[in-house]
């Protein structure tokens, strides 16, 4: 200041000028904050209220002093845990978080609070009565993170503190921005998950939280350096179990936490444990647990099985769920203990050839379904339907299936069922058994469709009309051949829907069999009291006439009737009488019959009206 102002005069008057002072100060009354003096010093005279994280740091340090009065954890190197935390949070961890700062505010306070919230979520005691409620509250966006909330709910317990410090120590241990411990991202993308933790913790799915709980458990409770191979084997099992388990409520997640904790003694040799007679795992999907145990035995047997199974699991659609392939090879996941007893080197060797064949078929099929849904993927769908009725029930509906991952109407759910349920596994196996050379799949699939015989009318109609697959969002159907088959735009009959066979007729008439002179459309109903059906119209001698063809009485009785004008005259009435139309009690001119018969009448009607038009 002396160097800058030594030759300047009149400055004091400017300092004490009450109307236009050169320097001003803002006063913030700190009495209400009730914090320690050293924290006020740390505020660095900013004159701003503390952020939630700054408040957390100060109070958390005092909390640590009171909570950990005994010997500090080993990772603190003999330093009191409160002092260790205080020093690290202002030095190494602060440097670690700097790349993740908010670019607008140049702070990482929100990121730290989000991390704290997430660590709390994955360290809840699964045996505590309040855990399910705690998880629901922590995943809710209605409550902002704060020290008071965390403390008052009892969440800053020893396991949370140990996990927080250990994770921060491990993540900040290397020269890179975030030290990762897995050899690759096959079973968990550590960087992507860490970014989600810092930016949107309340949006983490139950599956992600289960994976993170297993990930944190290994890093926190393993001593010394982390072995990437051992860690990868552990995370493969955790990810497969979590990803392929249905979670509907926080209590499902709590039970998964309990199962992971029970596995803690075997984290360093998880495959050996799973393959043993005591390798049962609770809480996760039973069929996935059985699959993991059989795969563990195969991996331990070697002979190319580790690479073979990895190639199957890594398909983007399967995501670790390949029990359907094991079932096709003759392994019974419903009797896993018996299968483990008989799975020796010789038995596993006999499984190699069929497994490779079914895997090749499955990889090609689901590549096509996902990447080419209206091309080669459609061919697979039709061929499988030609082999058998594999459609799963979804409530009162059945679905032609979509490539959704998590919904009941997805292929993923069918594959899960195929691991233990006879019908889908038998149909999949029957199709794949008819395929030989991967280069000739298309020709083989066409052959399966063309040679299909003795199949139900509804399956035959769909095979002949591929556009049915494009009808609804969820590809839902309702009914049966005896009650009428309906295609649903969504999931309910009070939404738009079509009758299967008249819709297929509409499709054929709209393409290569359009009746001469008629324009065709399809009337979709939104009520069970109103039948959907084919609508055909044309101009006849200056008057627009409209006919409908709808289901009259399931399963085979249809009606073809004149809608407008209701009362025909002249040549129109004559044409209808010649074709066999009759006036019913409601005054409509109609004919009844099987759909094939009425289909031919549509063509005859077109010809008759065309002829009468030309005579005129």
Image: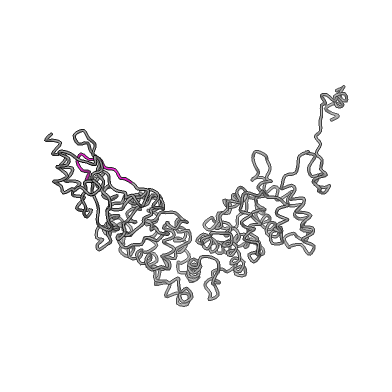
Looking at the picture, does residue 244 appear above or below residue 97? below
In-image side of 231 versus 47 (left or right): left
Residue drawn at 53 percent across, 60 percent down: 247
In this view, the residue in front, 280 or 586, is: 586
The range drawn in magenta is: 513-523
In-image side of 147 versus 234 (left or right): right
The chosen color scheme is one colour
Asked if the magenta segment contains residue 522, the reply would be yes
Looking at the picture, does residue 147 appear above or below residue 384? above
**Image quadrant containing the C terminus:** top left
In-image side of 464 versus 179 (left or right): left
Query: How many numbered marks does the figure carry?
Result: 0
Which residue sits furthest front? 585
Asked if the magenta segment contains residue 212, the reply would be no
Q: In which quarter of the image is residue 362?
A: bottom left
> Residue 200, position in %: x, y?
60, 49
Residue drawn at 65 percent across, 60 percent down: 123
């Amino acid at each position: 200041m002396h160097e800058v102002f030594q030759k300047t005069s009149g400055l004091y008057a400017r300092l004490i000028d009450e109307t236009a002072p050169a320097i001003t100060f803002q006063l913030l009354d700190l009495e209400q904050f009730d914090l320690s003096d050293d924290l006020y010093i740390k505020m660095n005279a900013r004159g701003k209220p503390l952020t939630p994280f700054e408040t957390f740091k100060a109070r958390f340090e005092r909390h640590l002093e009171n909570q950990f009065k005994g010997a500090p954890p080993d990772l603190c190197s003999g330093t009191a845990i409160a002092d260790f935390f205080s020093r690290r949070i202002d030095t190494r961890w602060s440097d670690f978080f700097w790349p993740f700062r908010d670019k607008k505010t140049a702070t990482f306070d929100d990121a730290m609070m989000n991390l704290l919230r997430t660590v709390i979520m994955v360290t809840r005691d699964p045996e505590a009565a309040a855990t399910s409620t705690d998880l629901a509250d922590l995943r809710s966006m209605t409550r902002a993170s704060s020290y008071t909330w965390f403390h008052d709910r009892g969440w800053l317990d020893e396991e949370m503190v140990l996990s927080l410090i250990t994770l921060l120590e491990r993540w900040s241990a290397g020269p890179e921005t975030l030290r990762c411990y897995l050899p690759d991202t096959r079973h968990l993308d550590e960087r992507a998950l860490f970014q989600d933790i810092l930016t949107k913790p309340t949006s983490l799915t139950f599956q992600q939280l289960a994976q993170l709980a297993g990930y944190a458990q290994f890093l926190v409770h393993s001593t010394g350096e982390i072995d990437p191979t051992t860690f990868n084997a552990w995370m493969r099992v955790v990810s497969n179990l979590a990803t392929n388990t249905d979670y509907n409520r926080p209590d499902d997640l709590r039970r998964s936490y309990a199962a992971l904790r029970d596995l803690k003694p075997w984290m360093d040799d998880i495959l050996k444990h799973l393959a043993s007679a005591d390798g049962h795992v609770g809480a996760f999907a039973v069929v996935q647990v059985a699959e993991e145990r059989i795969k563990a035995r195969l991996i331990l047997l070697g002979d190319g099985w580790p690479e073979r199974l990895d190639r199957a699991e890594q398909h983007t659609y399967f995501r670790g769920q390949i029990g359907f392939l094991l079932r096709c090879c003759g392994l019974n996941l419903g009797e896993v203990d018996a299968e483990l007893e008989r799975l020796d080197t010789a038995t596993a060797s006999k499984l190699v050839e069929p497994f490779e064949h079914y895997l090749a078929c499955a990889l090609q099929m689901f590549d096509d379904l996902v990447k080419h849904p209206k091309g080669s993927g459609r061919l697979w769908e039709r061929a499988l339907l030609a082999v058998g009725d594999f459609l799963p029930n979804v409530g009162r509906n059945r679905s032609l299936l979509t490539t959704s991952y998590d919904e009941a109407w997805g292929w993923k759910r069918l594959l899960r069922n195929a691991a233990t349920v006879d019908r889908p596994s038998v149909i999949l196996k029957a199709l794949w058994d008819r395929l030989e050379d991967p280069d000739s799949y298309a020709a083989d699939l066409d052959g399966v469709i063309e040679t299909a015989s003795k199949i139900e009318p509804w399956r035959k109609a769909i095979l002949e009309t591929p556009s049915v697959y494009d009808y609804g969002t969820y590809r839902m159907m309702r009914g049966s051949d005896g009650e009428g088959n309906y295609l649903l735009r969504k999931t309910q009959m009070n939404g738009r829907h079509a009758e299967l066979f008249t819709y297929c007729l509409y499709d054929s008439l709209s393409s290569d069999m359009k009746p001469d002179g008629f324009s065709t459309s399809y009337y979709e109903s939104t009520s069970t009291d109103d039948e959907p059906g084919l609508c055909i119209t044309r101009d006849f001698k200056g008057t627009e006439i409209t006919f409908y063809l709808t289901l009259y009485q399931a399963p085979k009785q249809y009606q073809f009737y004149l809608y407008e004008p209701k009362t025909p005259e002249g040549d129109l009435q004559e044409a209808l009488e010649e074709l066999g139309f009759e006036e019913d009690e409601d005054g409509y001119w109609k004919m009844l019959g099987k759909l094939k018969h009425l289909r031919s009448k549509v063509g005859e009607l077109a010809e008759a009206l065309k002829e009468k038009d030309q005579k005129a």
